[in-house]
């Protein structure tokens, strides 16, 4: 259906070499977009590029987006290749768990730098590319990857993570208000439990119990995340902005 067709679109997915980012990148590729993925590790970029090229045209560019300088460098590299970016997915993220009394300052900074500052700096750097892509009827899209831990109080002691995701949800609304008149939508996805490296240890220990708590009684699948990314990036989602969409089997909204 052309309502969900992304042919001719250019997408950038940060943290696109694994987990949620890889799921979204695959979905955008399958819908017809040309996709750039980034990750801190060059070997992870090469492996993901090899895996994803079966679905479409993909280019991996290593970048440590925890600094503004790297956000600017990634933008410059994409600007050398493209005149416009239709879809920016801010997915790169980090987590850290520790008891309250032991929670280290460097961990707080690490998580906030990547989870909150990076989406702001990268979106700002890419504004010229996004504005070049967006029109009144077909805006450019920014999709921020938050978390249901930013919607409710998590059970684990991941203080910086849940705080950063709640802040990212609000930054999404702030930017949606400012960038809407510039033909750019800004939305957030708040994933629940999905199989990823970040969730691997938790799911190994508590996976069955987490699935049982969800009204839909299962863990998220790659197609679930690919689907919401394609929806927000396509004509189907062109009138949605400032939204935070839980993709969690109903956990955050019913418990």
Image: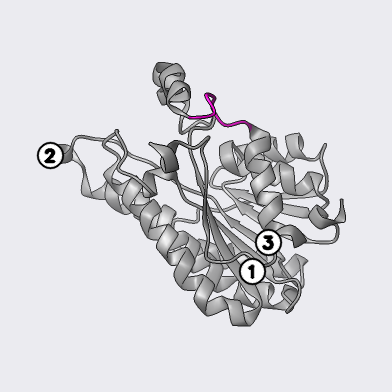
Q: Give whichever of 236, 147 is nearer the camera.
A: 236
Residue bearing the label numbered 3: 87
Asked which secondary structure carries label 3, the reply is strand
Q: Residue at x 66, y 77 (%)?
A: 183
Badge 2 marks a residue whose secondary structure is helix
- Residue labelled with disc 2: 101
Q: Is residue 189 visible?
A: yes
Q: Are marks 3 and 2 in contact (CB under 8 Å)?
A: no
Quarter of the image where one finds residue 12: bottom right
Q: Determine if the magenta segment contains residue 219.
A: yes
Looking at the rendering, the stretch of residues picked out in magenta corresponds to: 215-221
Let me know if residue 6 appears in the view.
no
User: Does the CB distance between marks 1 and 2 fall below 8 Å?
Assistant: no
Q: Residue at x 29, y 33 (%)?
A: 156
Q: Quadrant of residue 54?
A: top right
Q: Earlier in the sequence, mark 3 or mark 2?
A: 3
x then y, percent, for residue 160: 30, 48
175 relative position to 38: left or right: left
- N-terminal-most mark, 1 or 3: 1
- Name the residue at the bottom extreme: 181
- Check disc 1 and report the residue beneath it: 76
User: Can you say whether 31 is above or below 18 in the image?
Assistant: below
Residue that sits furthest to the left in the current view: 101
Figure check: 151 above or below 214 = below
Determine whether, in the image, residue 166 is placed left or right of residue 60. left
Percent coordinates x, y for residue 16 in the rendering: 62, 45
User: Distance of mark 1 from mark 3, alpha carbons?
Assistant: 16 Å
- Sooner in the amino-acid sequence: mark 1 or mark 2: 1
The answer to whether mark 1 and mark 3 are in CB contact below 8 A is no
Image quadrant in which the C terminus is located: top left
Classified by dominant secondary structure, the portion drawn in magenta counts as loop
């Amino acid at each position: 259906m052309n309502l969900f067709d992304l042919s001719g679109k250019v997408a950038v997915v940060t943290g696109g070499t694994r987990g949620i980012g890889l799921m979204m990148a695959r979905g955008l590729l399958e819908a017809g977009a040309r996709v750039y993925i980034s990750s801190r590790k060059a070997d992870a970029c090469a492996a993901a590029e090899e895996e994803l090229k079966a679905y479409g045209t993909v280019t991996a560019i290593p970048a440590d987006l925890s600094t503004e300088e790297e956000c600017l460098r990634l933008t410059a590299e994409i600007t050398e290749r493209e005149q416009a970016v239709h879809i920016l997915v801010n997915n790169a993220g980090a987590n850290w768990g520790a008891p309250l009394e032991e929670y280290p300052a460097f961990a707080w900074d690490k998580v906030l730098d990547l989870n909150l500052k990076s989406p702001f700096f990268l979106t700002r750097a890419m504004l010229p590319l996004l504005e070049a892509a967006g029109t009144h009827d077909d805006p450019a899209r920014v999709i921020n990857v938050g978390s249901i831990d930013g919607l409710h109080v998590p059970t684990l002691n991941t203080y910086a993570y849940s705080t950063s995701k709640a802040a990212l949800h609000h930054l999404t609304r702030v930017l949606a208000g400012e960038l809407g008149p510039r033909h750019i939508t800004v939305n957030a996805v708040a994933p629940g439990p999905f199989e990823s490296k970040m969730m691997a240890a938790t799911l190994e220990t508590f996976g069955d119990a987490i699935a049982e708590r969800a009204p839909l009684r299962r863990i998220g699948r790659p197609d679930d995340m690919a689907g919401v990314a394609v929806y927000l990036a396509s004509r189907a989602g062109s009138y949605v902005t400032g939204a935070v969409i839980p993709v969690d089997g109903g956990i955050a909204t019913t418990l």
